[in-house]
Image: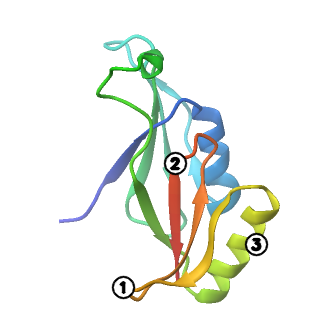
């Protein structure tokens, strides 16, 4: 078995696509517009060398306060391969106002930093 993809609701589909392209070098596919669910649009982001993809999804009903489909997950962790790569990406994101938590060694043994997507969804980058 292998993980095929994870899905992320966002209110800013283009901003989310640009985030993954800019900071992770993802290749983001063209928008898919559902005929069955009018207003639903998604795009798949493929990270370099990753087997799984990230499905970025949006829909007009995300604006409703009492919906089960709302933006985000708590976080996803992306391994960038080394502590130096974590530091480099954290510095880029700090300069762009996207760094939530500076690089550190966590109690459970990860060297990580936390970034924020345009809609505030958190991404952990680990070594």
Residue 79 vertical position relative to residue 8 in the rendered view, above or below:
below
Q: Position of residue 106 (x, y in %)?
A: 46, 83
Q: Residues within 10 Å of mark 2 (few under 14, many from 20)?
A: some
Task: Give the mark nearer the N terminus: 1 vs 2.
Answer: 1
Asked if labels 2 and 3 touch by Cβ distance under 8 angstroms, the answer is: no
Alpha carbons under labels 3 and 2: distance apart: 19 Å
104 or 79: which is nearer to us? 104
| Residue in view at x 43 percent, y 57 percent | 75
> Seen in the image, is 103 located left or right of residue 92?
left
Task: Give the mark nearer the N terminus: 3 vs 1.
Answer: 3
105 or 46: which is nearer to us? 105
Local secondary structure at mark 1: loop
Local secondary structure at mark 3: helix
| Residue in view at x 52 percent, y 48 percent | 121
Which residue is disc 1 drawn over? 108
Task: Give the mark nearer the N terminus: 3 vs 2.
Answer: 3
Q: Quadrant of residue 8?
A: top left
Specify the farthest residue to the left: 1
Residue 50 vertical position relative to residue 75 in the rendered view, above or below:
below
> Seen in the image, is 100 located left or right of residue 38?
right
Q: Position of residue 41 (x, y in %)?
A: 47, 24
Of tags 3 and 1, the one toward the viewer is 1
Which residue is disc 2 drawn over? 121
Q: Residues within 10 Å of mark 3 (few under 14, many from 20)?
A: some
Alpha carbons under labels 1 and 2: distance apart: 22 Å
Local secondary structure at mark 2: loop
Q: Quadrant of residue 65?
A: top left
Specify the farthest residue to the right: 95
Q: Position of residue 126 (x, y in %)?
A: 51, 77
Which residue is disc 3 drawn over? 91
| Residue in view at x 60 percent, y 49 percent | 117
| Residue in view at x 79 percent, y 56 percent | 96
């Amino acid at each position: 078995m292998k993980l095929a993809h994870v899905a992320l609701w966002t209110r800013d589909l283009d901003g989310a696509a640009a985030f993954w392209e800019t900071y992770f070098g993802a290749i983001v596919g063209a928008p898919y517009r559902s005929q069955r669910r009018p207003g639903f649009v998604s795009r798949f982001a493929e990270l370099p060398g990753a087997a799984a993809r990230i499905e970025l999804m949006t829909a007009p009903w995300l604006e409703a306060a009492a919906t089960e489909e709302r933006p985000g997950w708590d976080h996803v962790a992306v391994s960038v391969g080394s502590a130096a790569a974590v530091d480099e990406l954290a510095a880029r994101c700090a300069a762009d106002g996207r760094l939530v938590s500076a690089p550190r060694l966590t109690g459970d043994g990860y060297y990580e930093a936390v970034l924020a997507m345009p809609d505030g969804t958190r991404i952990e980058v680990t070594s």
